[in-house]
Amino acid sequence: DLIHVYNNKSQLGRITEPHFSDFLQHVKSKDIGNQIFGNSRDYVYFLRCPNKKLVDKLTSNGVINLVYSQWEGYLEERHKTYCSDTILELKSSPGVNFEAIHTSGHATLSDIKKLLKAVKPKRIVPIHTEKPELLKSLFEKDGFTNMELWEDGKEYQL
């Protein structure tokens, strides 16, 4: 049992779908609780967009190990996201052992649009998005009028 988890209550509260109940129970069974604040260096904090308040609390007890798990291009000026500045600040902080390990396969909207312009598909069907209607309207503004919104769980003919 080498892996333990600090369960941020606000994040756990977002996991409400019944099919995640086994996962949620497993995560809760590995809860390290407030022990993490006593010896922060013994743990690794994985992040996509850091909870600055939590990181500040952890680093107040010494150096922490932080793993950035997104594409490093988001830290470049031309691809900055809403949390890039915070991550760059942490990357250069003496209180942080920073490691970048890319684990995400998500592309930015501008990159997807570049790909679609190059490929010129007959139809576009988003299959991994929480807000397909919003995505469709954003793409239509750029002239992509061939996006189809399909229902989950329904079989379609290509």
Image (tube, helix red, strand yellow):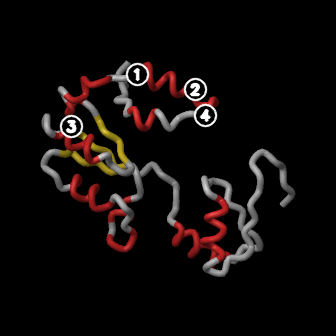
**Quarter-wise, where is residue 6 in the image?**
top left
Distance from the alpha carbon under mark 4 to that under mark 2: 7 Å
Distance from the alpha carbon under mark 2 to that under mark 3: 29 Å
Residue at the disc numbered 2? 21
Distance from the alpha carbon under mark 4 to that under mark 1: 20 Å
Q: Amino acid at mark 3?
A: Leu
Pick the front one: 67 or 86: 86
For residue 21, above or below residue 45: above
Measured as percent of width and height from the top left, residue 93 is found at: 16, 52
Earlier residue among tags 4 and 3: 4
Residue at the disc numbered 1? 30
Q: Quadrant of the N terminus?
A: top left
Distance from the alpha carbon under mark 1 to that under mark 3: 19 Å
Residue 16 is left or right of residue 95, and the answer is: right
What residue is shown at x 52% (from left), y 54% (from top)? 105
Residue at the disc numbered 3? 58
Q: Is residue 118 visible?
A: no
Residue 83 is left or right of residue 27, and the answer is: left
Q: Amino acid at mark 1?
A: Lys
What residue is shown at x 27% (from left), y 32% (from top)? 43
Measured as percent of width and height from the top left, residue 70 is found at: 41, 54
Residue 17, which numbered label? 4
Element carrying mark 1: loop
